[in-house]
Structures are given as structure tokens and as C-alpha cells.
Image (tube, rainbow, N blue to C red):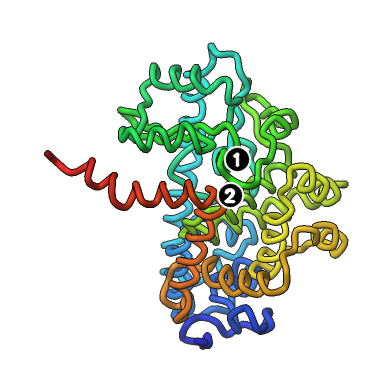
Amino acid sequence: MKRWTLSTGCRHRHFKPTTTLPPAPPLLLTVLSHPEQAGTLTPADWDLLLRQAGSANLMAALHALLQARGLLAAIPAAAREQLDWAGVLGERHRQAVRWEVRRIRLALRDLGIPIILLKGAAYTLAGLPPAQGRLFSDIDILVAESDLDQVEAALMLAGWASTHHDAYDQRYYREWMHELPPMQHMRRESLIDVHHAILPRTAALQPDPRLLRAAAVALPDEAGLLTFAPADMVLHSATHLFHDGELNNGLRDLADIHGLLRHFGAQPGFWDELAQRAAQLHLQRPLFYALRYCQRLLATPVPASASAACDSGRPGAALLALMDALFARALLPDHASCQDAFTPAARLLLYIRANWLRMPPLLLARHLFHKAFLSPREAAPA
């Protein structure tokens, strides 16, 4: 197994080697979990740190973190200039998200139904810590399944159109998935995903969306817009990350959970509610993984009692050892300094796992056969 050296930015002493995790973390993980170390870095360290942050889509978030800690003045001018530009981009992105969400609210206003914002849009409109410097490509909302048709029609009248025109893709989303086919605005090219649940209809886990909607919290001064309750927001983020096969933004999503746990964890009763809600929604396993890898990779403070309460989601010893080996690699930035010989295999295995969790075996085999052989033939020009 490859060992991290000073040239790869991993000279830090806060993480102890284990048999399943790489011996030392990439520099980006150390700075995210211990920002005060940013003042000790050399120009060569900064060059590597910024490359890792860019690969993880965390450059603007790194700027926000260092700015909040008052550390920007202590870093080399060249690095500070890059971070400042990333900060400007992050601020403009937040402004654009707020404007786009209000366009969505306007398009759906006459329906008189609650619109629940998810993930990045929810963090931004609620002013939560993960919104600082978070860049994302689409806005996710959740509505009741019975409202999907009228929501889709209203969005189409306001200029959004489906991005998937293939008949099989339409069926895939509408019959098997937990969302409509993604929609894009014809003029602004903004993307929106309309969900009715947080996991596909065909997944083994089926958290009840009615429970999520019933506990949703209204956004102040944003009539008709809501977010998930704090515990549900953490559980949704964990479920999304640990059931997704595309982990190119895996560290960013883990950092979201880290920020949410630090923020909500200060509220009385949050940790007890989180464990109870995970059991109610049958999401103990993704919560277990979220707490485990937040603590291991980002040094997230989690009370021992909370870890024990969430231990019901722990897999067997052999499976856990395998997951440690896979996620310890796949959650790192997609940069050469953060990879070893097993990283490609880890990402591939987690992609296969995500598809296995998404669909039962026969349906999955049929789907993969169609996408591999029939869809290309149907898309070919006559």
C-alpha cells in the first residue's frame, strides 16, 4: 500500500494508522479538520492543497472555512489570491441559487402545495454552514407523489423541459426511480430535480416520505418553501452519499454532513432524536457510515453516547472491514496524491454496490443490458 510522504502533503500527526485506512490523510483532510494548521504550510504545501481542494470541488468551501477562522491573512499571497477568487465564485453561486429558487417558487405558487428544498438549495436558503462555498449544478426539491403531474406541468409552463427524451429513460425515472427525469430551463439552462422520495421505488430501503414531509420545517420569509427537519436533513445527506455510485463529490458531501452535525449537534436533544429518527425511517446503516467516516476523515465531534446509540447500523466485521477499505479511498479527492493502486477498484466496487442497492438483481440486469446494448442502438442515426 502506498505511504503518504511530505511531497504528497501528508506529514500530519493527528490521524493514527489502522489496518483498513491509509496510513495518513491527504493534506486537504488535515486542513478541513484542523484549520489552524493552514498557517504552518509551505508554498509547496499550498500548491498541493489547492489542487486537492479543486479536485474535490471544495476550493470555495476552503476559502469560507479559513475566512471564518481569520486565517486568510497568514497564508501566502498567491494561494490567498486563488482562494479569494473561489470565494467570489461561491458568493455569486449563492446569489444565483437564491434567485433561481424564487423563480421555482413563483412557477409553483398557484398550486398551493409545500415545496421542500433538498441538499445544497436547502443549506443555502436556510443559511446553514454547509452552504458556505458549496458549489452544485442543480436544485433539488421534494413534493408529494400525488402532486408530481401538476408540478411538472407548472414547471414546463414556466420554461423547464425534460432532459431525457429516450422512451426507456422516461420509463426508468417514472416507474422505478424516486424523481422525475431531470428538467432544464430552456433559456437559463438551470437544472431542477423533482423528487417524491429519497430512495428509488425499487430500492430495498423505503423510508416513508410522508414522515419526512410531516416533519419538514418552514423557511422564514420564504412562503411555501420548507426544508427537512435537522435530523432528517442529516439522514437524507447520509443516505444520498452512501447509496450513490458517483463519488466524485464524495468528500464534499461528507463535509456537508460534518457541517450539519457540528451545527445541529449543539442543539439539546439532537443526538437522541437522530438515532430515534434513523430507526423510525430504517436508515441506521447509512447513518452509521456517516458518523464513522466523518469521525475518521474529518475528526467530527460525535458524543460517545450518540455513536453507541447508532451502533445498530453496524454491519458484520468482514463487511465493515471491506467498507472501510473502499470508502477510505473513494471518499478522498480525485487527485493523484490521494490515490493508491487500489483506488480505481474501490470506486468501481462502490459503483456496483450502489446499483445493487438501487434495484433488485433481475431488474438491474435488465436495466444494465438495455443501457449497454439497446440504448446505443436506438440512439444511432438511421
- On the image, the x and y values in percent for residue 180 come to 47, 32
Label 2: which secondary element: helix
The residue beneath circle 2 is: 240
> Would residue 163 appear left or right of 27 to someone viewing this image?
left
Label 1: which secondary element: loop
Return the residue nearer the eye: 359 or 178: 359
Please tell me how crowded label 2 is: few (under 14), some (14-19), or many (20+) other residues with Cα within 10 Å.
Answer: some
Q: Is residue 118 above or below residue 25?
A: above
Sequence-wise first label, 1 or 2: 1
The residue beneath circle 1 is: 198
- On the image, the x and y values in percent for residue 53 come to 48, 65
Callouts 1 and 2 close, C-beta under 8 Å: yes
Q: Is residue 330 above or below residue 114?
A: below
Kindly indicate the quadrant of the structure image that contains residue 167. top left
- On the image, the x and y values in percent for residue 276 come to 83, 46
The residues bearing labels 1 and 2 have C-alpha atoms spaced at a distance of 8 Å
> Would residue 30 appear left or right of 155 to someone viewing this image?
right
